[in-house]
Each structure stands twice: as structure tokens, then as C-alpha cells.
Amino acid sequence: MVARLVIAAPSSGAGKTTVATGLMAAFAGRGLAVSPHKVGPDYIDPGYHALATGRPGRNLDAYMCGTGLIAPLFRHGARGCDLAVVEGVMGLYDGAADQGELASTAQVAKLLKAPVVLVVDASSQSRSVAALVHGFASWDPEVRIGGVILNKVASDRHEHLLREALGESGVPVLGVLRRAPAVATPSRHLGLVPVAERQAQAVEAVAAQAEQVLAGCDMEALLALARSAPSLDAEPWVAEVGERLHAGGSGVPTRSALAERMPTPKPVIAVAGGAAFTFSYAEHTELLQAAGAEVVTFDPLRDEALPEGTSGLVIGGGFPEMYGEQLSANEPLRKAVAELAASGAPVAAECAGLLYLARSLDGHPMCGVLDADARMSERLTLGYRDAVAVSDSVLAPAGARMRGHEFHRTVIEPGAGPLAAWGLRQPERRVEGFVQGGVHASYVHTHWAGSPEVAARFVGHCA
């Protein structure tokens, strides 16, 4: 059994990330092996979690992966750890739009049988905090709120009023945090600035968060609460592609057949990283490796060539719009990517990768693989997507269904190629993305743990 806590809040902006990351770093500093997790599709917070714990930050997304994988993915990430801290998303009961509790922090807490610590922004209230906490604690009897951490408390007098009010609620106060500018993390158009873009400052911020938590929270009570979680009846998720790489007569060989034809050495799949491409799920690399690939990371801001022997390319999400000039200046790599795509090699690009493959981004020349131009937009596109593959591709056969997520403040024109990648059913029906030779490029982020055949199919094409 792994001791575990879910850190939630009534709404976004209450300080979940500060508290969760501070707790992770503080417990790790005490010598505990801490497993970091994040509810939902967020890529940025797990970077700070990894910095705090020295372990990969992992996501628990019930919409994209399915409710049945939440406990197995949790156990996979928490293997060998003393404690797991799970940071929630949005408000405690907020989830996928029009889907009830699906993908909410509350649902994940129930699936993990984990006690919840509610982080409350107390900056503009006193006695009302008791009504707020009572409402959240009683809304769903299956959600166990084991304590409250009061954030942004102004003074000793303010703290006294809050504690007095909560004394009648039956929910213990496990911490009180004052306003502290040193723990703040800068934000921009898509949320926090990723760790990879501010490494030194991020280290300082995480250290400050740990100090604040140690000074203001009852660490022993929090650990006791975490250890009160019951045993979890689920086997750890394993990065296996299954006996068939893709079911249903797709023409993709069985795993054993793939092993027989797999070249030696293994096919090299290059994965974009560095400051411009920070969005990735750890399970993707694990699945590619399980399917027989050698995964090598490269940095499009610095590396002028693809890794030696590259036979496939994965370019995930990130912030290329912040580095358009630098990415454009690396002409040798742009040319290498274009040549690889022209050769028919498998290329999987999501969001930032889509922009990088375009002809231009905010006027800066990009790889020119796609006959399209991208630019920043005032409009934020955000939400889960129910997607159907429109065209056969290196990721999926036509007609395959997947669930994904869009999160960007850019547009690409045209929004889809002659062969589109996905047909989306909500919030409006539309086709988007590009399938072109071995290229699959789209704004939609997917989590392959829920569809491991995607990684296997991709590696199969690389082989």
C-alpha cells in the first residue's frame, strides 16, 4: 500500500500547485520517496512535481485513459514509493464538460480511495470559510475531505477567525500559509512557465514552497492522513502493446511477427524536447520502448541534426510560439525534418509539433512539411475532444476512435489538409489536422496509455 493524499481546491487559483509541490519537496527532503501525480491533461505542473521529487510527474486522466486505468497508472507511477501526492485540477468537483463527475479531482480521489486535503484561498473571508468547507465536505459522501490548508492568510488575527469558524465544521485545519511572493511562479497565455524555461528560478521557487509548507503545515498530521488510505485493489499498469499491435484486420502484424522483422539495432525514434517542446507523457516513451524502439531525445533549439539513424519522429506540445525566431534560425534541423518527412518516415506531431511542421509560424519560416501557416491568436481553444480518425495514418486506421484534449492560443490556416487527421464531435463538429505520407499532425493531444496500439502501430511503421 502507498500512503496517498489528493490536494484539491474549491476553484482554480487557490494555490493547489504551490501546496502540492511544496508538500512533495518537503516530504522528499525528509527522506521519503515521493510519487508525484496530476489530475487531468496538464503538462506544466508535472514538471515542477518532478523537480520537487526527482521522479517523473505523471498524469491521471479519466477522460483520455478511462476510469479503469486510473488506479493501475497510479500504482505504476508510485511503485517503490513511501508516499504519493496527487494534485487536483480546477475545482474539486469540476470535470469534463457535460460529463458529470468524469475526469474531476473528486472522481480520481474516489478511484484511488484517497483522502482529500482542501486548499482554500482565505484572503477575502473569515467565518464564511466554514460554510464553504462544509458544503464541499458534504456534497459527495464518497469523497473524504480529511483536512483543510488555509492559503493567503493575512495575519494572526485573520488566522484566529478562520480557525474559530472551522472549529465547528468537523474538518481539521492541517496548515495555514501566509502570502509569500517568493513561492509565486510566473504565468503566461497557457498557464505557468515550464521548468525547462526557468530552471534556476524554478529550483528556488520549489525550495521556497517547501519551506513555506514546513513552516505552516502539520506534516505529521498530513502524513498520518495519507497513511490512513486503505489498500488499493489494482495491479500496476505495464507498458505492453498486447498480443496484437492493432485489432480488427488493420494489416499491422502481431507483436511476435514484428519482433521477427524488427531490425537490429532497434529502430530509432527521435522525440523533440528542450525549452520549446516540454509537453509529453512519460508513458509514451515507455510504450514506444515496449514496442521495440530506441527513443532518443533531441532539442530543436540547439541540435542541428536529428539523432543518428532516426527512422521515426515524435514532436509533442510546448511553446514554439515563444521561440519562433530561434527555431527558424536552426535551418539545418528544419531541413533535416523536412527531408525525413519527404522520405515517408513516420512523423507524429501534436499541437506545437503541428506548428513546427508548418510553412511558417508568426512569419518565421518553419519546416515547410505542411502547406499551412500558423500564428498566435487572441482566442484560447481548450477542452476535451472525442475524435475519430478520418484517414489511415501511422497512428490509427480510418474509423478508429480516440479521446484527446486541445489547449492552444494559436491557429493554423488551413485547419485541415486534403486528408484530415481527426473528425471531432464536440464542442462543434469539424475536421482538423493533416495526414500526409507518413506524417500525422494535429492540434489534439492524446494519451497513449489508453490506446497502446497507437504506439505499437507507430513503431511497426518505423520498423
Image: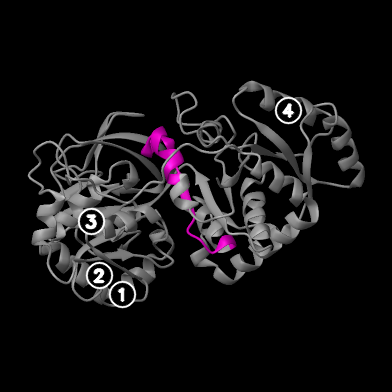
Report if residue 77 lies within the magenta region: no
404 or 416: nearer the eye? Answer: 404
Quadrant containing the C terminus in the rendered view: bottom left
**How much space separates mark 2 and mark 3, taking CA atoms?**
28 Å
Which residue does the image show at 27% across and 54% down from the upper left?
349
145 or 270: nearer the eye? Answer: 145
Closest to the camera, between mark 1 and mark 3, is 3
Q: Provide the secondary structure element on which disc 2 rests.
A: helix
Q: Position of residue 89 (x, y in %)?
A: 54, 40
| Residue range highlighted in magenta | 52-73
Q: Which residue is mark 2?
A: 334
Compared across the picture, whether 452 is left or right of 236 comes to left
Specify the label residue 330 is tagged with.
Answer: 1
Q: Provide the secondary structure element on which disc 1 rests.
A: loop
Q: Position of residue 124 (x, y in %)?
A: 79, 37
Q: Which residue is mark 3?
A: 291
**How much space separates mark 2 and mark 1, taking CA atoms?**
7 Å
Badge 4 density bin: few <14, some 14–19, many ≥20, Cα 10 Å = some
Q: Which residue is mark 4?
A: 132
**How much space separates mark 4 and mark 1, taking CA atoms?**
53 Å
Q: Position of residue 122 (x, y in %)?
A: 77, 39
Q: Provide the secondary structure element on which disc 4 rests.
A: helix
Q: Earlier in the sequence, mark 3 or mark 4?
A: 4
Whether residue 451 is visible, yes or no, is: yes
**How much space separates mark 2 and mark 4, taking CA atoms?**
53 Å
Residue type highlighted by circle 2: Arg
Badge 3 density bin: few <14, some 14–19, many ≥20, Cα 10 Å = many
Quadrant containing the N terminus in the rendered view: top right
Whether residue 380 is visible, yes or no, is: no
